[in-house]
């Protein structure tokens, strides 16, 4: 039945932390986010600090780790790799610190294409380890339009890449679906102000429920609103559970997310 509460804890694979320089976000702190998670039934949220994405990757990544330490078992961290800010240093830090479970890149904000040489280290690391990479993706962007990730998938077939927002617009969703349909290393993520239940259903129908992930863009978009789009989408309960938790648990295997049961426990 549409709208039934999921049977397992939800995993939110796309969230942020802290203030943003371009507009005001109320209560963007980790403690407030965890309080909302308690109400939505979200077990763990994977986030990247806005400071890391915007101004200082190294300092912002430290802020993300502080949130992990303050809320063990509830918050997990992406290491933001800015291609203009010593990406090799942050990749080395990621490799050495087990509190990081994935990589976050934002090519549109950093004005550097996903196919550029400065990102090669990211894709090489992901291909060799299985570390998931969450990237912003945006229709018609010269930096991270969904079609550009086909080149990444062709060059680095073992690199698991999450197309954040799945291209953002309805036309972008179509483009992201086409790219993911051609390359199994590309995953679709559902957050965005233009996302709807029918678009989520289209992703599931055309790519399969096993490569669509729940993300909220919290606190840019309230987690409750983003979650409602999936809970009320025209999906079967099995498909909904895949999107809300099962797929994330399957994808994040390089460093498992908090709360994941040991193999054989289920």
Image: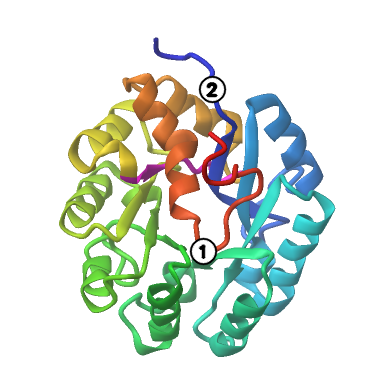
As drawn, which residue projects farthest toward the top? 1
Q: Residues within 10 Å of mark 1 (few under 14, many from 20)?
A: some
Q: How is the image coloured?
A: rainbow
Q: Secondary structure at mark 2?
A: loop
User: How far across and how far down the image is residue 192, in percent?
Assistant: 44, 43
* Front in this rendered view, residue 242 or 232: 242
Q: Is residue 236 magenta?
A: no
Q: Which residue is mark 2?
A: 7
Q: Which residues are magenta?
A: 211-219
As drawn, which residue projects farthest toward the right? 70
Q: Which mark sits nearer the N-terminus, 2 or 1?
A: 2
Q: Secondary structure at mark 1?
A: loop
Q: How many marks?
A: 2
Q: Residue at x 32, y 34 (%)?
A: 200
Left or right for 184, reference 262 = left
Visible residue check, residue 177: yes
User: How far across and how far down the image is residue 60, in percent?
Assistant: 70, 70
Q: Residue at x 52, y 23 (%)?
A: 6
Check the picture and name the quadrant holding the N terminus. top left
Q: Is residue 216 magenta?
A: yes
């Amino acid at each position: 039945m549409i709208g039934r509460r999921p049977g397992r804890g939800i995993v939110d694979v796309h969230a942020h932390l802290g203030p943003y320089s371009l507009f005001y976000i109320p209560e963007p702190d980790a403690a407030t986010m965890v309080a909302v998670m308690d109400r939505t039934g979200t077990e763990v949220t994977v986030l990247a600090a806005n400071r890391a994405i915007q101004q200082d990757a190294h300092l912002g990544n430290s802020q993300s780790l502080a949130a992990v330490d303050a809320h063990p078992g509830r918050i997990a961290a992406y290491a933001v790799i800015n291609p203009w800010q010593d990406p090799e240093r942050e990749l080395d830090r990621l490799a050495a610190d087990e509190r990081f479970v994935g990589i976050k890149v934002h090519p549109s904000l950093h004005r550097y294409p996903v196919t550029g040489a400065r990102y090669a280290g990211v894709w090489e690391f992901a291909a060799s380890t299985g570390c998931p990479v969450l990237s912003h993706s945006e229709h018609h962007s010269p930096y991270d339009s969904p079609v550009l990730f086909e080149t990444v998938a062709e060059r680095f077939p073992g690199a698991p890449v999450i197309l954040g927002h799945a291209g953002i617009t309805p036309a972008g969703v179509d483009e992201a679906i086409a790219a993911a349909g051609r390359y199994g290393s590309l995953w679709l993520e559902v957050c965005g102000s233009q996302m709807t239940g029918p678009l989520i259903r289209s992703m599931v129908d055309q790519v399969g429920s096993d490569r669509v992930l729940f993300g909220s863009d919290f606190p840019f978009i309230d987690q409750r609103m983003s979650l409602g789009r999936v809970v009320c989408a025209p999906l079967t309960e099995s498909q909904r559970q895949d999107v809300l938790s099962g797929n994330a648990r399957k994808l994040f295997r390089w460093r498992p997310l908090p709360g994941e049961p040991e193999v054989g426990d289920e």
